[in-house]
Amino acid sequence: MKKTVLVTGGSRGIGRAICVQLAQDLDFHVLINYHSNKDAAMSVAKEIEALGKTAEILPFDVSSRAAVQEALTNWKVSHPEYRVEAIVNNAGITKDGLFMWMDEKDWHSVISTSLDGFYHVTQFFIQDMLRQRFGRIVNIVSVSGLKGNPGQTNYAAAKGGVIAATKSLAQEVGKRNITVNAVAPGYIESDMTAEMNQTELKKHIPLNRFGQAKEVADLVSFLVSEKAAYITGEVININGGLYT
């Protein structure tokens, strides 16, 4: 069986770095999920293949249960020799704004992508992982889900919900050698932070810089590896000391 990892939102930024790192470090066949940017996803697959590893792209909207079920069911049927051993729930969006003026669709779209997306994707594979008595689940959350952030009530609620789900699921499935952990980045250089004032924000970060996507990917790679087999139910900060 070819061991496989699914990375949601894997076409850009942190997701892209995670895809490449898991292929390189742990020789996973990488399923690169994307929603709309096929060219970016193809670029990640080509980068992985240039390393002598294997990958394929898999389009679906994590917020839609029907879309997730259809895409993953079709993939499983056509790939009987592959076994999904790891899931990285990375897909997420922001729709920032003060809560008093927040539109209902901005609330629900952010919650649906991060929290419902976690449910739709993880629940699809969890019985397989229980039967195979092995699994690694890593949820990419945020410092906002731990300490909150003004203008991000929706995003903080979404990531805070995933954090709580991480801790609960870890206790449910640990006896079957399945670990469930969360990684909580702070300010990481990516499309999501491109418009931020780094000069001003770095003043609040003890390490005096934004993080790199590869640094997050290295942490995820560790959590998926056998080196982290006794770590579960944890939320690991990677924020340069911004919040501890």
Image (cartoon, grey):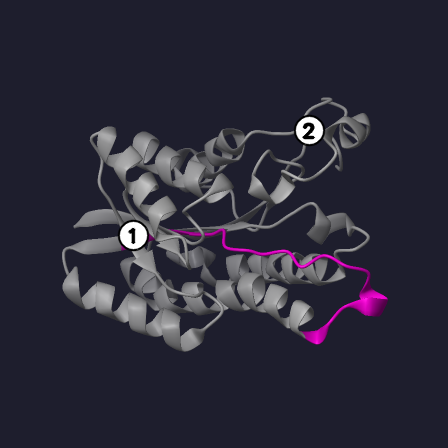
Q: How many marks?
A: 2
Badge 2 is on which residue?
Answer: 240
User: Toward which corner of the image does residue 97 lie, by quadrant?
Assistant: bottom right
Q: Is residue 112 above or below residue 145?
A: below
Nearest the eye: 199 or 234: 199
Direction from residue 171 to residue 83 in the image, left or right: left
For image coordinates 64% across by 40% down, the residue present is: 193
Report the side of 238 relative to 126 (left or right). Answer: right
Q: Is residue 74 above or below residue 132?
A: below
Give the percent coordinates (x, y) of residue 171: 54, 59
User: Alpha carbon of mark 1 to alpha carbon of mark 2: how far?
Assistant: 32 Å
- Give the side of residue 31 with respect to residue 212, left or right: left
Helix, strand, or loop for circle 1? strand
* The residue stretch that appears in magenta: 84-104
Q: Which mark is residue 57?
A: 1
- Foreground: 181 or 209? 209
Q: Is residue 99 magenta?
A: yes
Q: Which residue appears at 47% of the width and 39% of the height?
A: 220
Left or right of 109, for residue 91: left
- The answer to whether the residue labelled 1 contacts the one labelled 2, judged by CB atoms less than 8 Å apart, is no
Q: Earlier in the sequence, mark 1 or mark 2?
A: 1
| Residue 45 x/y as whole percent | 29, 42
Does residue 209 appear in the picture of this structure?
Answer: yes
Residue 209 position (above or below residue 33): above
Q: Nearer the viewer, residue 112 or 100?
A: 100
Residue 238 picture quarter: top right
* Residue type for callout 1: Ile
Picture quarter with the C terminus: top right
Q: Secondary structure at mark 2?
A: loop
Q: Position of residue 184 (x, y in %)?
A: 62, 44
Say few, some or many: other residues with alpha carbon within 10 Å of mark 1 (under 14 / 14 to 19 / 20 or more): many
